[in-house]
Amino acid sequence: MTNMLDLSRRAFDFQRGNITVIGTWVQLDFRRWRPCLVLVRTGEELREDTWPCVVTLDQAWIWSEEIGDPQRAAHQAMAFAQALRLGDTPQTVIRIASLIHDHLGDLLGIPPYQGPDDEPVAEVTITDRATGRTREVLV
């Protein structure tokens, strides 16, 4: 089975200039969806010829400043820059790596996937103790 993304279903999206960072889910097999970050060119999110750049939850550690792998992150950021048609200048590679790093916490906060047949059974308020920021989630 090929992994599948549905960019119309989003936990969040942030526009940063000509890059949009989307929090969504990737389908790994028939019933298993996992959170991921997707980078696309702003305005091209739903175009047929869009090449989404995906950071899956199990690969998020690569981008961490504490435990990450800077060499792998740089190579991946360069590949993303090329796929997004932004050029592979050092500034662009650093910008992409920084965007991903900045949104790792958002990736970790994506709730479990709820398909069209899943019905929420509760509403939960999540509070970040460090910042006091709260958000409500249907589960």
Image (spheres, grey):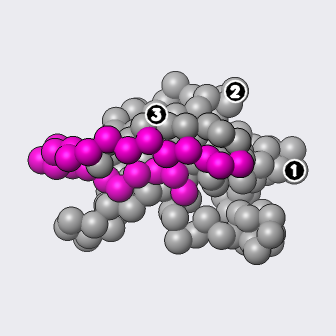
Dot 1 amino acid type = Pro
Where does residue 4 sit, x and y in percent of width and height? 32, 56
Using residue 47 as the reference point, say whether residue 134 is left or right of it: right
Which secondary structure type mostly characterizes the magenta part of the structure? Answer: loop
Residue corresponding to mark 3 = 45
Residue corresponding to mark 2 = 17
Dot 3 amino acid type = Glu
Q: Which mark is residue 90?
A: 1
Whichever of callouts 2 and 1 sits on the residue coming sooner in the sequence is 2
Using residue 127 as the reference point, say whether residue 116 is left or right of it: left
Whichever of callouts 1 and 3 sits on the residue coming sooner in the sequence is 3
Whichever of callouts 2 and 3 sits on the residue coming sooner in the sequence is 2
Disc 2 from disc 3: Cα separation: 14 Å
Rendered residue at 21%/44% (across/down):
120
Using residue 131 as the reference point, say whether residue 124 is left or right of it: left
Where does residue 114 sit, x and y in percent of width and height? 26, 49
Rendered residue at 38%/44% (across/down):
124
